[in-house]
């Protein structure tokens, strides 16, 4: 179960990095690259949510959040 939580945390980190990169591109006026990185951030965020939800469900604490 710990591994599932670590996988979710890693996806959250990837989402955060993609958000930061998107912001950097946006500041430079490179909106195409900013959009691409923002979309990757959303994908990582969605995946992180699913992994966290699975980990929570496996832990036997459904609905405790």
Image: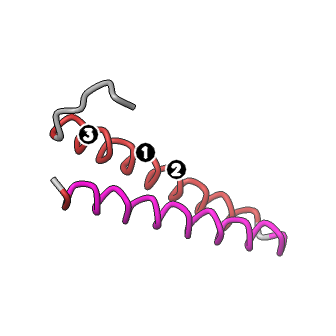
- Callouts 1 and 3 close, C-beta under 8 Å: no
Q: Using the rendered view, name the quadrant where residue 29 is placed.
A: bottom right
Residue 42's mark? 2
Nearer-the-camera pick, 26 or 58: 58
| Lower sequence index among marks 3 and 2 | 2
Badge 1 marks a residue whose secondary structure is helix
**Crowdedness of circle 1 by 10 Å Cα count: few (<14), some, many (20+)?**
some
- Separation of residues labelled 3 and 2 (CA atoms): 21 Å
Residue 9 vertical placement versus 17 (above, below): above
Residue in the image at 45% along x and 51% along y: 43
Q: Nearer the viewer, mark 1 or mark 3?
A: 3
Q: Distance between the residues labelled 1 and 3?
A: 15 Å
* Mark 2 and mark 1: Cα distance apart in space: 6 Å
Whether residue 21 is in magenta: the answer is yes
Label 1 near label 2: C-beta < 8 Å?
A: yes
As drawn, the label of residue 46 is 1
Main SS, magenta residues: helix
Helix, strand or loop status at disc 2: helix
Question: Mark 3 or 2, which is nearer the eye?
Answer: 3
Between 15 and 43, the one nearer to me in the picture: 15
- Which residue is denoted by mark 3 in the rendering? 56
User: Vertically, is 50 above or below 64?
Assistant: below
In the image, residue 28 lies at what x, y percent? 83, 75
Residue in the picture at 67% in, 65% down: 22
Q: Quadrant of the C terminus?
A: top left
Magenta residues (range): 4-29
Farthest top residue in view = 63
* Mark sitting earlier along the chain (1/3): 1
* Crowd class of label 2 (few under 14; some 14 to 19; many from 20; radius 10 Å): some
């Amino acid at each position: 179960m710990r591994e599932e939580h670590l996988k979710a945390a890693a996806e959250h980190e990837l989402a955060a990095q993609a958000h930061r990169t998107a912001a950097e591109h946006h500041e430079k006026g490179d909106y195409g690259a900013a959009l691409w990185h923002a979309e990757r951030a959303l994908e990582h965020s969605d995946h992180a949510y699913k992994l966290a939800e699975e980990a929570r469900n496996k832990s036997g604490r459904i609905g405790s959040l």
